[in-house]
């Protein structure tokens, strides 16, 4: 087995290798003066089970292209099996035609990864479970709930209500309700523009309760900040936010700094920027053990889904 890392998230890849007690695969990733990427794998990978860790986060297109070149490089070097480990899958939200004359870019990216040489994909919270069907190769889908639930469970928060910041996230919120023994409330939102969201109505009682608001992605933070303000106005006490992917794009950090949120918890699927670190309220949990365990099981041809049934603890 060989684990390689692109440039998008080397710290996570290094932590995964540490969990696996494996050395990082050697590769040279260079950029020509005209902007073209060049990758050379320094290790012999003929007949080897290879894993490439690369989040397609900002800069999305650059990181995606690097992943595709990496996959093609390993395929041409005669690797036995190539798994694209994509902790954060960019373009995941472009998964349908919601108006005329628009692409389904998530499907395009899935096709590109398969064509480049991926034999299987390992992802974390792909935004919608049906994205697995966009691939014509096996997909192992992990969820940040395994890591986040353990963290919030250890905090022993009393009078806890889990709030889904939008109707589409109810299933994810229900997982936290089951894990933490909490109540459930749901926010119905109105989208005013691409980066502006307004919380319209709240289903459930949050008065005098501590709130855990969960989502898979915090992008522009419009949804979570609007929902946080609504539950505070309805009498909520402390407000915690948990999300797998901290994208923090556009006005996200400015909005979060003004929102009535006590703590924001994300995983390290995307590296935290210096601006996000300066906010002071963001806690980052590592999903390296979870991903590393999944890589170990894929390599040994063991069940990955049993991770969810056993609710394995990840330090």
Image (cartoon, rainbow, N blue to C red):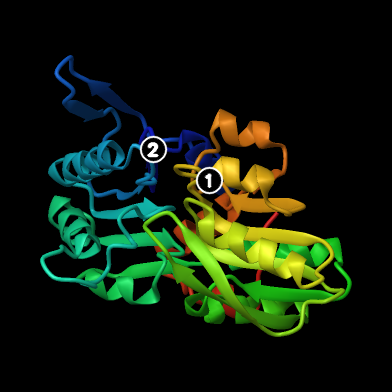
Can the viewer see residue 283?
Answer: no
Q: Is residue 45 above or below residue 176?
A: above
* Left or right of residue 139, residue 75 in this image: left
Instruction: Decide which of 220, 67 is in the foreground and name it.
Output: 220
Q: Which residue is mark 1?
A: 252
Secondary element under disc 1, as helix, strand or loop, is: helix
Pick whichever of labels 1 and 2 is earlier in the sequence: 2
Rendered residue at 73%/54% (across/down) = 260
| Residue 302, percent from left and from top | 46, 71
Q: Is residue 67 above or below residue 314?
A: above
Can the viewer see residue 266?
Answer: yes
Q: Which residue is mark 2?
A: 5
Secondary element under disc 2, as helix, strand or loop, is: strand
Instruction: Decide which of 121, 186 is in the foreground and name it.
Output: 186
Quarter of the image for the C terminus: give it: bottom right
Rendered residue at 60%/79% (across/down) = 201
| Residue 42, percent from left and from top | 28, 27
Q: Is residue 128 above or below residue 80?
A: below
* Left or right of residue 296, residue 48 in this image: left
Instruction: Decide which of 15, 48 is in the foreground and name it.
Output: 15
| Residue 24, percent from left and from top | 44, 35
- Please, which residue is most extreme toward the top here? 33
Q: Nearer the viewer, mark 1 or mark 2?
A: 1
* Left or right of residue 151, residue 38 in this image: left
Report how far apart the C-alphas of labels 1 and 2 lie in the structure. 28 Å
Rendered residue at 57%/69% (across/down) = 199
Rendered residue at 38%/53% (across/down) = 85
* Left or right of residue 169, residue 126 in this image: left
| Residue 78, percent from left and from top | 17, 46
Mark 2 surroundings: few (<14), some (14-19) or many (≥20) residues within 10 A: many
């Amino acid at each position: 087995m060989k684990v390689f890392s692109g440039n998008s998230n080397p710290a996570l890849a290094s932590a995964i290798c540490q969990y696996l007690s494996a050395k990082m695969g050697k590769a040279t990733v260079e950029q020509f003066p005209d902007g073209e990427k060049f990758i050379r794998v320094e290790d012999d990978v003929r007949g080897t089970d290879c894993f490439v860790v690369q989040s397609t986060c900002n800069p999305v297109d650059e990181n995606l292209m690097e992943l595709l070149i990496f996959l093609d490089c390993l395929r041409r070097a005669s690797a036995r099996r190539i798994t694209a480990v994509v902790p954060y899958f960019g373009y995941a939200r472009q998964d349908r035609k919601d108006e005329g004359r628009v692409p389904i870019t998530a499907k395009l990216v899935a096709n590109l990864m398969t064509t480049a040489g991926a034999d299987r994909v390992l992802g974390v919270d792909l935004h919608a479970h049906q994205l697995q069907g966009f691939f014509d190769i096996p997909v192992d889908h992990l969820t940040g709930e395994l890591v986040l639930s353990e963290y919030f469970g250890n905090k022993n928060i009393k009078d806890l209500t889990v709030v889904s910041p939008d109707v589409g996230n109810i299933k994810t919120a229900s997982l936290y309700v089951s894990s933490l023994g909490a109540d459930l409330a749901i926010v119905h939102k109105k989208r005013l523009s691409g980066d502006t969201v307004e919380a319209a109505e709240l289903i459930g009682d949050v008065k005098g309760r501590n709130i855990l608001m969960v989502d898979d992605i915090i992008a522009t933070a419009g949804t979570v900040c609007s929902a946080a303000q609504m539950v505070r106005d309805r009498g909520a006490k402390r407000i915690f936010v948990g999300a797998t992917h901290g994208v923090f794009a556009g006005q996200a950090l400015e909005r979060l700094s003004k929102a009535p949120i006590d703590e924001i918890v994300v995983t390290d699927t995307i590296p935290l920027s210096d601006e996000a670190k300066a906010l002071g309220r963001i806690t980052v949990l590592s999903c390296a053990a979870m991903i590393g365990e999944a890589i170990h099981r894929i390599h040994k041809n063991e069940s990955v889904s049993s991770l969810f049934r056993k609710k394995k603890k990840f330090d």
